[in-house]
Amino acid sequence: TTVTMLPIDAIRPNDANPRSEIGDVSELAMSIASQGIQQALVVTPANQEGRHTLVIGHRRLAAAEQAGLATVPCIITDMDEQTQAEVMLVENIHRDQLTALDEARGYAHLLDLGEDVDQMAKATGRSRSTVQRRLKISSIDDEKILALPSQLSFEELETIADFRDDEGLQDQLIKAAGTNNWNMTLHQVQAKRSLDKWIEQAQEAIKQAGLPIVPLTPSQSWSDPEGWRTIARFSPDTDPDPKQALDTWLEEWEGDKPTAAGLLDRGGQWRVKITLLEPYTQQDQEDERRQREDDLARWQAEQEAEIAPAKQLDTASHDLRLAYTQRLMSLKRPAKNQSQALSMLVIAQASQRTWWVSRDQVRDTWRAIVQDQEAELAQKADLDESRRTQTAFALCHAIMETQINHETWRSQDDIDGLLKPLYRALQTAGYAISDEEQSGLDGDLVPRPEEEDNEGNEDETDDGDQEEDTKE
């Protein structure tokens, strides 16, 4: 192979280079200034302007220019645009010098040049599924990519690409990318997508049942719309498949069939529902009943609105805490500072009134943490010291976890005595506390004294009405 010395100003970087940033070449420039360039650059033949296009050696060219060289050794090879793109992508892939976004752009460029997935896989040595995953990342809008940290993992980028059909949810993920809020935000957007899907399925199920839809408002989440009486309710929490739930109920119901369906499609996870309705025309009773139910609905709506943030935080944070301890159990050795975190859990647990903890709850939580390792741990009484540390940490966590519910986040005593010690221990073992969890630990969900006074006044005023409602 012939090596030719070419002037640096006769070589131009390749616009299709998949690596968006050359990076710092100071050390390479010092080496080149001292020892010269040991490996020739690869360029294409000169164009009409007398300039060669660089294919391999972008960092060496930048370093040579920084070192003050006038010429560099080059191998001149005739390559079409597609071959150039393949060579540059393969070189950077196998040198582990590409970010996830840069590699995705490289595959997208090859796709634009007419290569299919099989050709790209063969040219780069990647599997077909790997190429497809990279191409999926390239579907993220260019403007949105500019807002992303450069070192995100492929898994995070794939997740963002998965939400390309919902720009609002995708923007939430992009904002949280690279921060401690990523897992919490992902949990929230996945829940929102699941809820939207349930509503869509509910609308289709009602349509197939031939029932007209009566729109409901959040204030009617526990009361009937005017002129109707509820005979059945379905919600995402109790009926994950609304079509199956509706079909089964209609098939088994022996009374008069409903003549309409109410649908509440907003207001959050605890309000969205389907209600099956029948006309209710007994005017005298209707007026009295409506007044009582409106009062009760208003009170319940207020209570529900007040505790909804605590319920949402409790659900999400519980999943994240258990998932983190599951990951610690999967490690071959304890995480850094896990022994110290275990001591913190033991001290915190010793100060708790745990006499009321259910053994069944502890067992279920423990099984959720250790998963398929339960049998192995039960048989090995002589666990090594590191495994004992992990197992003891998981058990202490399970005991404390069973004492936490949404009301825990609304009690300053429980926050100080239970949540804060648990989170301090988890954080010592490496857990990243999200902004929403920190807000809860700061007591932002604890009712203020004036709110508690209002609740007390309502209880005293409505005792008689509520007692009457209970009897009915």
Image: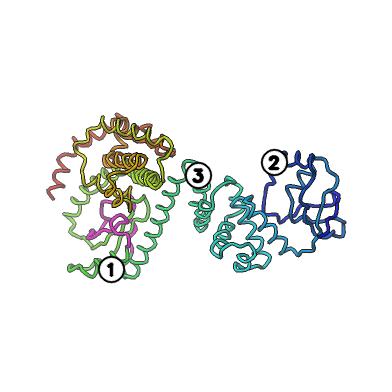
Tell me residue 165's x, y (percent).
50, 59
Residue 95 rendering spot, x and y as whole percentages: 64, 52
Q: Are marks 1 and 2 in contact (CB under 8 Å)?
A: no
The residue pinned by badge 2 equals: 24
Query: Which residue corresponds to mark 3?
Result: 176
Quadrant of residue 423 within the rendered picture: top left
Is 228 covered by the magenta stretch?
yes
Alpha carbon of mark 3 to alpha carbon of mark 1: how far? 40 Å
Kind of element beneath mark 2:
loop
Coordinates of residue 402 in the picture (x, y in percent): 27, 42
Q: Nearer the viewer, residue 70 or 319?
A: 70
Mark 3–mark 1 contact, CB under 8 Å?
no
Identity of the residue drawn at 57% across and 46% down: 151
Callout 3 amino acid: Ala
> Residue 56, can we see it?
yes
Q: Quadrant of the N terminus?
A: bottom right
The residue that mark 1 highlights is: 247
* Residue at disc 1, secondary structure: helix
Tell me the distance, in whole angstroms, between the alpha carbons under discs 3 and 2. Answer: 28 Å
Q: Magenta span covers which residues?
A: 213-241
